[in-house]
Amino acid sequence: MRVALFATCVNDAVYPSTAVATVRLLERLGVEVDFPAAQTCCGQPQFNTGYRRETEPLVRRMGRAFEGYDYVVTPSGSCVAMVRDNYPRIARGGDDAELTRVSESLVPRTYELTEFLVDVLGVTDVGAYYPHQVTYHPSCHGLRMLGLGDRPYRLLRAVKGLELVDLPGAEECCGFGGTFAVKNADVSAAMGTDKVRNSLATGAGTLCGADNSCLMHIGGILRRQDAPQRALHIAEILAATEEEPLV
C-alpha cells in the first residue's frame, strides 16, 4: 500500500517530534511512508474563521499533494475532520469540478493515526513501552466528529508498563477550539484550567491526546502552573520502545 504522512501545520511548526514519531511507529509496523513535500495547510483555520473562498486553493493543493496514495495518515483528528466534514461542504458550496473531485477522492483515504492503526492495520499492540501513569484527553473533533471511540484507549492499554488512569470529565472540551481560543480568550482559559485540574487529580505524570492543538493549550496551562505533568501526543508514546525509550 502507498501511505502518505500529512504532518499538519501545528506539528510542522511546533511539534515536529510528533510527525517523526508517527513515521517511526508506522515503519516499525512494516508500513512504508512517503512525505509529499508539496503539502501545506488543509485550510481549517481559514474555513473556521469564515473564509471559504480563501480555503479553496488549499483544498486543491491538498488534492494534488496526496494524489495517487492509498492512504493519507495524520496525527491530528481536527485536520481529518476538516477533510471529511468540511471538504464536501466546500465542494457543494460552489460550481467547481476540481473541488468535487478532490473531496470525493480524499475523504475515503484520509485517516487519523489511531483509526489507521486499529481499522486498517488491525493492530492494538504496537510493541510500545512507556512505564508511566497516563491519562487520556479525547479531543472534540476525534470524539464527536470522527467517533474515534475506544481506539486510543485500546492502543494505550496494550503499551507495556503503561498504567491508564481515567480522566474525570474526559468528554468536556479543553477550551482550545482553534479560533475560539483567540476570540474568547477568558472562557477558553477557564475551560483549560478546569481540564488541567481534572487531569492533575488523576495523579498521572502524563496527559496524552491525539491532537497537538489541544495539548498545546493544556500544556501551556500546565507549564504556567509549574505542574508535575507533561502533555504528550499519543504517537510519541506508541513510538517509544524499550530499545528506544521516550526521553
Image: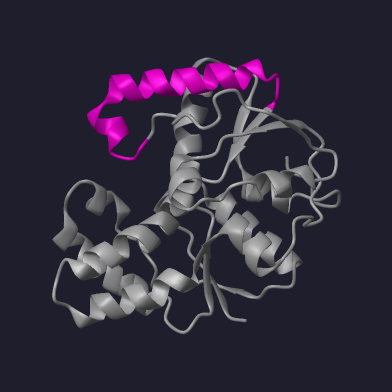
> Foreground: 158 or 9?
158
The colouring scheme, among rainbow, by chain, secondary structure or one colour, is one colour
Residue range (magenta): 177-205
Q: Residue at x 68, y 43 (%)?
A: 153
Residue 109 seen in the figure: yes
From the image, which quarter does the C terminus lie in?
top right
What residue do we see at 62% from left, 29% from top?
230
x%, y% of residue 79? 41, 55
Residue 137's place in the image compared with 50, above or below, is above
In the rendered image, which quarter contains the N terminus?
Answer: bottom right
Magenta region, mostly helix, strand or loop? helix
Q: Position of residue 74 (x, y in %)?
A: 52, 60
Q: Is residue 193 above or below residue 37?
A: above
- The foreground one among 174 and 149 is 149
- Point 78% across, 41% down: residue: 130
Residue 121 belongs to the span the image colors magenta: no
Horizontal side, residue 244 vs residue 97: left or right = right
